[in-house]
Amino acid sequence: MEAQNCCARLTFRCGNQFGCHNVGSACASQQELTRLGHDKGVSAGRRSAQAECASSRLRETVWNVITGKELVNKFGDNHSIVAAFGQAADRFSVCHLQNASAMTSIAACISRDAKGSIAALRVFIVHSHPEAKSFNAAMTVAAKTVLLAAGHEVAVSDLYANKFDPVSGRHNFITMHNPDYYKQQDEEAYAAAHAGFAPEIQAEMDKLFWCDALILQFPLWWFGLPAILKGWVDRVFASGGRIYGGGKWYDRGVFAGKRAMCSVTIGGAQPIYSENGLNGPISSILFPINHGMLYFTGFTVIEPFLVHSPARLTAEERAAHLIRYQKRVLDLSEAPTLSYPKLADYDDQYLLKVRPTDRIMNSALRTPDQD
């Protein structure tokens, strides 16, 4: 009843500014969640399944309210997409909404009254593109906007805007283990034991430990990460047990229980990055990142979100990808993941005890379907 009254008040306050005739369906779904929580005649398993269904409708409604169909109609080119999303980031809307407090209240109503069915997440986005009007920038703003509106917390490290130095060296530390010979892993281990990381490195580490989910947002450059993002990994993913080391790796890693996802723009079309394509499957290209950086440090790796050839797309197609991306980030806690063998599956020489079947390998390395 509180959720219904809350949405009714907000509908009265917002009028047509929202274009959000879906608020009523949010209330209906919320009532269903509330009823399921108190209906003693329904089995626990069935209640859970039905509550999840209702929760999905709530998430869908939040997305509809925030985005609206006006998105495709209003954004004429890439610059205007970013400008609109930039305004949206300040107002928790992508439809030029004027009532930020009302949008926040809707998210609060749903978060409070769903009684945990939509768990709040802490999301850390590492953004790696030099152009503030790029499609990558639009993706980051779109993600931040919709996550905040849904009641999640978001931290963004914009590496280019922050002028992050990707070059490792003694400036990584405020301590010194061996003044005569620089070995980064030894210095990292010493810094880990003596609180010796430079402030800019410690700040990035703190965000990693703070977050529930990590998103690496970047364009694919030369079949890999932009140099600034690779340097961020080199400097921030420190050994000595801080981020890895001392038996803390893969499924026993420091970040076990957290999720991570690559959100990637790719210059070429999808066919050239397929199994039989000239460039090879995108899953193999991203393997060193998904497996060698994210899974290596303990993250459960979400299937990557891919946008091919954004520069060759129409404004409507780009806007559709932004909406698709917002739906993905709202579902980070339940999005499909890549499957990798666990440490227990290997012998003492780190060879698989049982040769993996084609099915397992295909599951771990497959190219994700479009959402």
Image (spheres, helix red, strand yellow):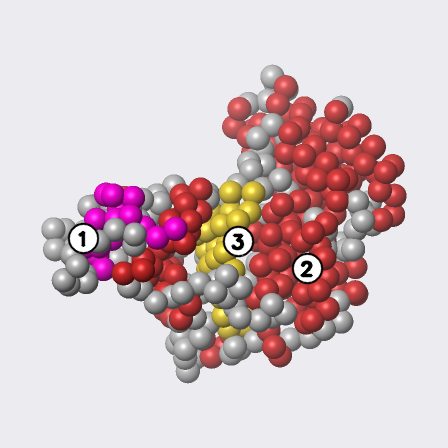
Mark sitting earlier along the chain (1/2):
2
Give the residue at mark 2.
Answer: 86
29 relative position to 349: left or right: right
Amino acid type of the residue tagged 3 in the rendering: Val
Q: Residues within 10 Å of mark 2 (few under 14, many from 20)?
A: many
| Quadrant, the C terminus | bottom right
Residue 239 x, y percent position in the rendering: 25, 52
Give the residue at mark 3.
Answer: 156
Q: Is residue 70 above or below residue 32?
A: below
Query: Looking at this view, is 250 or 29 the one in front?
Result: 250
Identify the residue at image location x=88%, y=43%.
15
Q: Is residue 163 above or below residue 13?
A: below
Label 1, label 2: how many angstroms apart (C-alpha)?
A: 45 Å
Mark sitting earlier along the chain (1/3):
3
Residue 277 x, y percent position in the rendering: 43, 79
Q: Which type of secondary structure does the marked residue at label 3 adopt?
A: strand
Q: Is residue 133 above or below residue 86?
A: below
Q: Residues within 10 Å of mark 1 (few under 14, many from 20)?
A: some
Q: In this view, which residue lies farthest toward the top?
A: 40
Q: Which type of secondary structure does the marked residue at label 2 adopt?
A: helix
Identify the residue at image location x=16%, y=56%.
178
What range of the chain is rendered magenta? 184-199
Magenta stretch encompasses residue 319: no
Amino acid type of the residue tagged 2 in the rendering: Gly
Residue 294 x, y percent position in the rendering: 36, 55
Q: Which mark is residue 177?
A: 1
| Quadrant, the N terminus | top right
